[in-house]
Amino acid sequence: MSVRVIRPGLQTTVQAAPRTGYRHLGVPSSGAADPLSLALANRLVGNDLLAPGLEVSLTGPHLRFEQPAWFAIAGAMAEVFLNDRPTDYHRTTGARKGDVLRVGSLTSGSRAYIAFAGGIIGQQLFGSASTYLPARFGGFEGRALRSEDVLELGKSDAVDEQGSTPDRFLTPMGQRWALRTCRWSGAGSLPSSQQERLFGNRWTVGRRADRMGLELEGTALETQTNGRLPSAAVFPGTIQCPEHGTPFLLSVDAQTTGGYARVAQVARVDRHLLGQLRPGDQVSFLPRTPDEATVELRAKHDVWREWLPDIEQVI
Amino acid sequence: MTTVVPKIVADDLVEFEVDSVQVAQHVARVLRESGAWREVVGGIDSVVVQFDAVRMEARAALAALNAQLSRVPPMKSVDADVVEIPVIYGGEDGPDLDGICELLEMTSDDFVALHCRDACPVEMLGFTPGFAYIGGLDDRLDVPRRPHPRQHVPAGSIGIAGGRTGIYALPGPGGWPLIGRTPEPLFDAAADEPFRLHPGVRVRFRPMRERAR
């Protein structure tokens, strides 16, 4: 079972579950930047929710099926053709040997996900097959796909439940985002007046926006640090602020420790959205206490569990 | 160990401060070995614990953490291996060296002599795979981070900040002023032991004139 890459797209990588338990070694999480969309695609082809699939960024790949296979697409929207026929997102779709899948440019949101029944067989390291590009490991040879790469698919049972994502689980992507966020209240955080400025303003995602993190343009924060803060742990969702005052929102490939002031932490309930923010999008941060954020996380799980039974492993 | 006071800093994160990087790394290792936490990351003077907020209320996490902290065994000292790291100082490899020497009012020869004098302990790993925080820097070589991080730091670059030396094993962004670069690979994903350096090892920097070709 294999799929051949005809055109790779801007940055198409194999992504699966995050790595956990290795941050003390400087090994980041990686994994799907929007794990919920990967899970929705995997759900439709009978895979584990975070089985290795393709993460597509901004422009999509062209792929040829070397064998018949079931696939499904979710996440940021693009025009998609199977041979010359438009094909749907969020639907179990069968490809025959020789069929060509073409994914166009993503129009809103940053990342789309293609899941194949059986999953992609990727290089496992530190407990996950997810690609971590800076250190060139995981996924397909630790790198983004190139033309003529051949992806091997795992064995799968016949997909017995062809279907589509129920309408109530379709989440449209916009250009405005509101992320539930906790004030960082530990050592090395900013004074509360500057934290309020983060919550009180709307921010624009800057041009520096990738899997490592996103620059937030707006009213600069005053850090009052002097470049000598002791390095300390940071995580996907941490908003840190270097001395120049432009906050940086860390994402899935973020470094594991850093020496800039920590301002706030996007709560787990909304961290899966980070992967869809794109340059020019508007972001605001909604203040939450840790307890409020956890109640909302559980409520979100309760909603999604009906369609994605293992939702706790996803978000 | 002196009493530490963990604090809930976000919905699934608890942080506490400690007296030294050695204590931070020791306590973090003990907590990690308990298997109770998603991540335990020691910093220079702090530890952050990430817990699964679905399985554990924040208050329960705090209580469990406090119970573990009350039973942390004392540190054992170990004899440290010395690893020699060759460094090309200054020039394109260390673009901030001249500026640092100007700030510190010393010649680059004096700087290099001080930087190479002692075998310095690796205090922690972190940042990105292979990045090592190395202590033991002479007090005279204390400079701050850059206010504007660089977007592209080449692999092998060596920086100093806040009284430490750091080695960027991978290319990527970075905020430490750069003094030189080593051709030695410090991270190899394909190796049985991917990390060349780890806490406890000591590093001696050795100046090299130019890159071996």
Image (cartoon, rainbow, N blue to C red):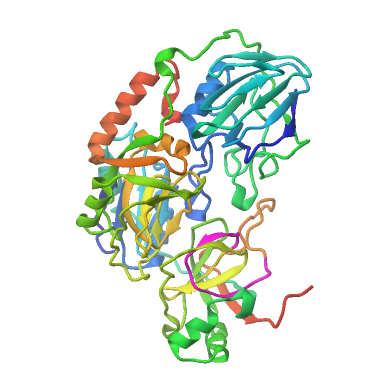
Q: Residue furthest toward the left?
A: A193
Quick check: is B182 in the magenta stretch?
Answer: yes
Out of A303 and A199, give the one closest to the viewer: A199
In the figure, A222 relative to A52: above or below? Answer: below
Residue B74: give x, y in percent of width and height. Answer: 37, 62
In the rendered structure, the answer to whether residue B30 lies left or right of residue A141 reads left
Q: Residue at x 53, y 19 (%)?
A: A43
Total numbered labels: 0
In the figure, A79 relative to A286: above or below? Answer: above
Residue B23: give x, y in percent of width and height. Answer: 37, 64
Out of B206 and A83, give the one closest to the viewer: A83
Out of A203 and B97, give the one closest to the viewer: A203
Quick check: is A75 in the magenta stretch?
Answer: no
Q: Quadrant of the C terminus of chain A?
A: top left
Choose top left, top right, bottom left or bottom right for residue B56. top left
In the rendered structure, the answer to whether residue A6 lies left or right of residue B43 reads right
Residue B89 shows up from this direction: no
In the rendered structure, the answer to whether residue B166 lies left or right of residue A271 reads right
Choose top left, top right, bottom left or bottom right for residue A41. top right
Q: Residue at x 53, y 51 (%)?
A: A27
In the figure, A102 relative to B46: above or below? Answer: above
Residue B138: give x, y in percent of width and height. Answer: 45, 83
Residue B22 shows up from this direction: yes
Residue B120: give x, y in percent of width and height. Answer: 52, 76
Chain part drawn in magenta:
B169-184
Choose top left, top right, bottom left or bottom right for residue B206. bottom right
Out of A17 and B198, give the one closest to the viewer: A17
Q: Quadrant of the N terminus of chain A?
A: top right
Q: Residue at x 41, y 83 (%)?
A: B139
